[in-house]
Image: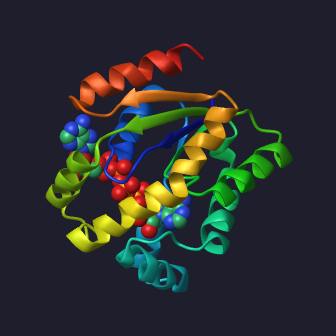
């Protein structure tokens, strides 16, 4: 099974991803984690990506799409994968469609985690990652509304989005996600 987790920054994609990989045999692909690792390792890619992440902007497609395409073609993804934070724009969604077709991979199940803006700001300020300050959070929410919401519409038109209420206990939210995944 291939899974895509979408939702605004702080909706709990990374949190629920940890639960999903424990129960389902899928490779976890998080562009955010991959980019942060590059930054930590001091690679050229990491330095470049960090300029955008600090401003709350999307890292350019030429970096992210190539990175995901390479990752998806690795052996551990053949038995299924979960994308946590990709696609985040229409161009990324279309690039993903092409990748999946080219590699003859199964159509993904899309889980959309819905959380109100006030709750998101609150959670992210509490999380306190390097890009979790008020100004960057505002910019990330703007990017979500402008660039990532159309991705959800794009998949909704194809009739393949499962909406999950992302407010409540982490276990309760995961139980709802599990119901969807167990029905596939
Ligand atoms: P990501 O690393 O994807 O991070 P995120 O969207 O901010 O967080 P997530 O939704 O995973 O929330 P989490 O579980 O941590 O992106 C960071 C940056 O990387 C982007 O801004 C961008 O610059 C770049 N990037 C990533 N993907 C890209 C792409 N495809 N293209 C271009 N650029 C890209 O949860 C947040 C907090 O809430 C945690 O503290 C958690 O403990 C808490 N929480 C979770 N569930 C909760 C619940 N039910 N109740 C209360 N708190 C909860």
Identify whether 9 is placed above or below 184.
below
* Left or right: 94, with 180 as reference point: right
Identify whether 138 is placed above or below 109.
below
Residue for point 69% across, 47% down:
75
Residue 90 shows in the view: yes
- Tell me where residue 63 appears, x and y as whole percent: 62, 73
Give the position of the N terminus as an image quadrant: top right
* Left or right: 45, with 178 as reference point: right
* Left or right: 142, with 24 as reference point: left
Exactly how many numbered labels are in the figure?
0
Identify whether 84 is placed above or below 45.
above
- Tell me where residue 35 appears, x and y as whole percent: 47, 69
Residue 108 shows in the view: no
- Tell me where residue 43 appears, x and y as whole percent: 50, 83
Residue for point 65% across, 42% down:
154
Which image quarter: residue 128? bottom left
Residue for point 31% across, 27% down:
173
Residue for point 45% across, 55% down:
145
- Tell me where residue 93 appears, x and y as whole percent: 67, 51
Quarter of the rendered image showing ligand 1: bottom left
Foreground pick, 30 / 146: 146
């Amino acid at each position: 099974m291939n899974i895509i987790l979408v939702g605004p920054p702080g909706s709990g994609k990374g949190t629920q991803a940890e639960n999903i990989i424990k129960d389902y045999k899928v490779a976890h692909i998080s562009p955010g984690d991959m980019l942060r690792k590059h930054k930590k390792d001091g690679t050229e890619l990491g330095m470049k990506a960090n300029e955008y992440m600090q401003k709350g902007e999307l890292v350019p497609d030429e970096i992210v799409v190539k990175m995901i395409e390479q990752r998806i073609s690795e052996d551990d993804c053949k038995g299924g994968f979960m994308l946590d934070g990709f696609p985040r724009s229409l161009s990324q969604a279309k690039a993903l469609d092409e990748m999946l077709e080219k590699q003859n991979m199964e159509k993904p199940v899309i889980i959309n985690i819905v959380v109100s803006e006030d709750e998101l700001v609150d959670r992210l300020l509490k999380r306190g990652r390097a890009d979790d300050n008020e100004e960057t959070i505002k910019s990330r929410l703007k990017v979500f509304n402008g660039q990532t919401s159309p991705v959800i519409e794009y998949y909704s038109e194809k009739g393949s989005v499962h909406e999950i209420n992302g407010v409540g206990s982490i276990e309760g939210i995961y139980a709802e996600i599990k119901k969807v995944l167990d029905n596939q």
